[in-house]
Image: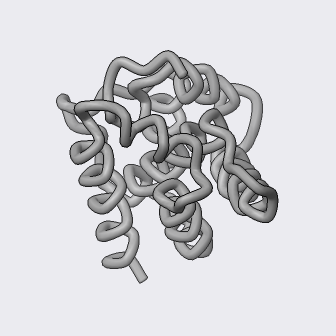
């Protein structure tokens, strides 16, 4: 995992995933990310790349409920463009999947959790995931 930050788009995998927004319906792209991690959880171990994508997807979903992208937000261009084009649309139906995906990220069979545990930024990563879950819970 090429990571430079605990933030959802602070790794190569999530940044690469962002370009899927150029070719498809963003909500379908987001839901596919959640479906992948949920399906992978049925196996023995959740791959770190699948986890990175689910984390980024949850972040984009949360941001889709906001009025605008703030100056402090740093999203790849396709995601920024999609958020701007869809700022008056919301998809509350994806919240349960997003919360489940975020819970899976910190489960004992998550490779991503294992990798972050070995870093100095684990607490920040967990705080980011908890903040996303809290925001999603406030939208239901």
Number of marks drawn: 0
Percent position of residue 114, x then y = 48, 43
Q: Residue at x 46, y 23 (%)?
A: 11
* Residue 93 sits in quarter: bottom right
Q: Residue at x 47, y 47 (%)?
A: 113
Percent position of residue 1, x then y = 54, 22
**Colouring chosen for the image of the structure:** one colour
Vertical arrangement, residue 140 with respect to residue 42, above or below: below
Percent position of residue 116, x then y = 39, 38
The residue closer to the viewer here, 14 or 74, is 14
Q: Residue at x 61, y 56 (%)?
A: 109
Vertical arrangement, residue 12 with respect to residue 7, above or below: above
Does residue 45 appear left or right of residue 77 in this picture? Answer: right
Does residue 47 appear left or right of residue 138 in this picture? Answer: right
Q: Residue at x 30, y 70 (%)?
A: 134
Does residue 49 appear left or right of residue 126 in this picture? Answer: right
Does residue 40 appear left or right of residue 104 in this picture? Answer: right
The residue closer to the viewer here, 108 or 129, is 108
Percent position of residue 104, x then y = 56, 61
């Amino acid at each position: 995992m090429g990571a430079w930050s605990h933030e959802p788009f602070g790794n190569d995998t999530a940044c690469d995933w962002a370009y899927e927004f150029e070719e498809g319906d963003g909500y379908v792209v987001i839901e596919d990310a959640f479906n992948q991690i949920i399906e992978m959880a049925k196996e023995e171990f959740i791959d770190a790349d699948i986890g990175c994508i689910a984390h980024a997807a949850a972040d984009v979903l949360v941001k889709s409920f906001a009025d605008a992208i703030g100056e402090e937000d740093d999203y790849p261009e396709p995601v920024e463009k999609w958020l701007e084009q869809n700022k008056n649309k919301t998809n509350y139906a994806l919240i349960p999947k997003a919360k489940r995906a975020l819970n899976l990220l910190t489960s004992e069979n998550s490779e991503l959790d294992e990798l972050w545990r070995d870093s100095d930024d684990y607490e920040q990563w967990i705080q980011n995931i908890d903040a996303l879950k809290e925001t999603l819970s406030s939208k239901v």
